Amino acid sequence: MATLYHVPLSPFCRKVRLSLAEKRIECELIEERYWEQDADFLRRNPAGKVPVLKIDGMVMAESAAICEYLEDAYPEISLMPKDPVGRYEVRRLVGWFDDKFHSEVTSKLVYERVNKKVMKQGYPDSKNVKFGAQRIKYHLDYMAWLLDQRRWLAGDVMTLADFAAAAHLSSLDYISDVDWNRSEVVKDWYAKIKSRPAFRSILADQVPGFLPPQHYADLDF
């Protein structure tokens, strides 16, 4: 069985968890307090970050590289299109959410509201929170624009791009920071994706000291 060292609200860990579950790869989840820089964990990943995945006799770090490996090693259930243009679009959108969205939204909301408290690093920076709350509107509008033209974010089938976006939004939804009324098409997309069996463990997450809203685990909102 594979082992994933993770943090529940980390979107990068959630993306890997969704990929593993969708590909039906059994995996043990171990929460890792990576900020404590434990020596054993640093031997697994000298960068001191999660996720870290033990699988097939290897120890892997960096969510993008992990997901690419899973796609290559377990292609029976694919999360990438076959054609080069489609694969480019998936990678572009994964980069969008893991870079731009994370920088402008997730790091400003989840990290400020949750991570700082868990890591005992003080109080949220109100300027960061305000910035994140403003920028998420832009990103939801961009998703709505994409979904007005496509069934899923990158095209007509669900891909890793959808899991990358859902990983970030589910972390934000846990702390009630997503205005689902802003776009009906984005809300419908998220309802579809969180109804998948792969999402069950995500919806069962519990972070001590932080209770999710009632709709968090409700498949019908």
Image (spheres, rainbow, N blue to C red):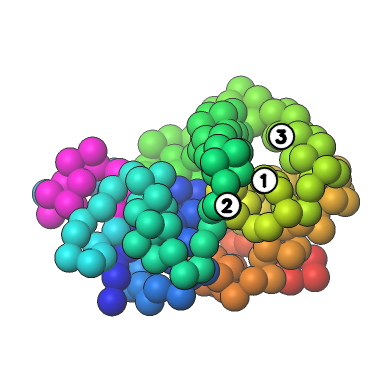
Residue at x 68% of width, y 57% of height: 157
Q: Are marks 3 and 1 in contact (CB under 8 Å)?
A: no
In the rendered image, residue 85, in percent from the top left (x then y), is placed at: 60, 38
Range covered by the magenta-colored residues: 40-52
Q: Is residue 135 visible?
A: yes
Q: Is residue 160 visible?
A: no
Asked if residue 46 lies left or right of residue 104, the reply is left
Please identify the quadrant where the C terminus is shown.
Answer: bottom right
Q: Are marks 2 and 1 in contact (CB under 8 Å)?
A: yes
Give the crowd class for mark 3: few <14, some 14-19, many >=20 residues within 10 Å.
Answer: some
Asked if residue 107 lies left or right of residue 165, the reply is left
Would you place residue 90 above or below residue 100 in this image?
below
Residue tagged 3? 139
For label 2, the SS is loop
Q: Hey, what amino acid is under mark 1? A: Ala
- Rounded to the nearest angstrom, the CA distance separating label 3 from label 1 is 15 Å
In primary-sequence order, the first of circles 2 and 3 is 2
Residue at x 17% of width, y 41% of height: 46
Q: Hey, what amino acid is under mark 3? A: His
Residue at x 21% of width, y 56% of height: 59
Report the front residue among 148 and 208.
148
Please identify the quadrant where the N terminus is shown.
Answer: bottom left
Residue tagged 2? 81
Residue tagged 1? 154
The question of residue 75 being in magenta is answered with: no
